[in-house]
Image (cartoon, rainbow, N blue to C red):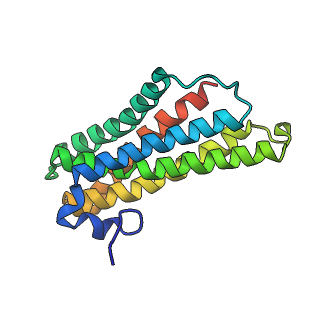
């Protein structure tokens, strides 16, 4: 039975082919297309004024995707390297890319819940916070927690860090990623 980093990252990252750069690039493309689909669906069915989808919009979502891929890569690689892990940049890119999948899952679920609340015409004033905050923040934190699970397994079994060091490195990386994702919500 094939293992995946979502269910058993320890076993997956112990494999020789775990750091496949083509697979990582495919994951990043899936994240970008998934983010575009979620954004376009929300624009088309939500109460957001429908603006034309431009090349600039497509490039901005690609830029955000690359940012969410590169920042964890740099953090995982930099901290791991400083701690003596046997890291290769391409393997670190692959490890970071697997963390995008929980982020996309959180984005999809969050938008589906918000869409359902909107479709059911739930009164947003019944809660002390905006529905966006009530739904997006916990799901983002849950997605980042899932990414910690994946990254810890990769750092420990793929790169040879001790469990406590791999866990703290993954937590630091996910904490910074969560901060980046939640900063726009905090500034609203």
The answer to whether 143 appears left or right of 185 in the picture is left
Q: Is residue 66 above or below residue 89?
A: above
Residue at 46%, 21% (x, y): give it. 56
Residue at 85%, 36% (x, y): give it. 125
Q: Is residue 50 above or below residue 89?
A: above
Q: Is residue 139 above or below residue 181?
A: below
In depth, the one of 8 and 39 nearer the eye is 39
The answer to whether 109 appears left or right of 48 in the picture is left
User: How many badges with numbers are in the image?
Assistant: 0
Quadrant in the picture for the N terminus:
bottom left
In depth, the one of 159 and 53 nearer the eye is 53
Residue 172 makes an appearance in the image: no
- Residue 137 is situated, as x and y percent measured from the top left of the image, at 60, 43
Residue at 46%, 42% (x, y): give it. 33
- Residue 151 is situated, as x and y percent measured from the top left of the image, at 34, 54
The answer to whether 21 appears left or right of 122 in the picture is left
- Residue 43 is situated, as x and y percent measured from the top left of the image, at 65, 33
Residue 124 makes an appearance in the image: yes
Residue at 33%, 57% (x, y): give it. 152
- Residue 186 is situated, as x and y percent measured from the top left of the image, at 60, 29
Q: Is residue 183 above or below residue 145?
A: above
Quadrant in the picture for the C terminus:
top right
Q: Residue furthest bottom?
A: 1
The answer to whether 182 appears left or right of 152 in the picture is right
Q: Quadrant of residue 167?
A: bottom left
């Amino acid at each position: 039975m094939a293992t995946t980093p979502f269910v058993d990252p320890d076993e997956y990252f112990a494999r020789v082919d775990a750091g496949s750069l083509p697979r990582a690039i495919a994951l990043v493309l899936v994240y970008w297309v998934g983010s575009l689909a979620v954004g376009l669906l929300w624009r088309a069915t939500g109460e957001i004024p429908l603006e034309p989808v431009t090349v600039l919009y497509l490039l901005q979502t690609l830029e955000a995707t690359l940012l969410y891929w590169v920042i964890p890569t740099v953090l995982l690689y930099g901290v791991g390297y400083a701690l003596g892990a046997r890291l290769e940049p391409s393997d670190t890119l692959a490890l970071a890319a697997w963390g995008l999948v929980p982020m996309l899952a959180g984005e999809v679920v969050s938008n589906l819940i918000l869409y359902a609340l909107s479709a059911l015409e739930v009164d947003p004033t019944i809660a002390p916070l905006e529905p966006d905050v009530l739904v997006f923040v916990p799901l983002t934190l849950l997605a980042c927690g899932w990414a910690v699970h994946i990254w810890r397994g990769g750092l420990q079994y793929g790169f040879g860090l001790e469990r406590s060091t791999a866990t703290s490195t993954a937590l630091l990386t996910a904490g910074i990623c969560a901060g980046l994702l939640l900063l726009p919500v905090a500034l609203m």
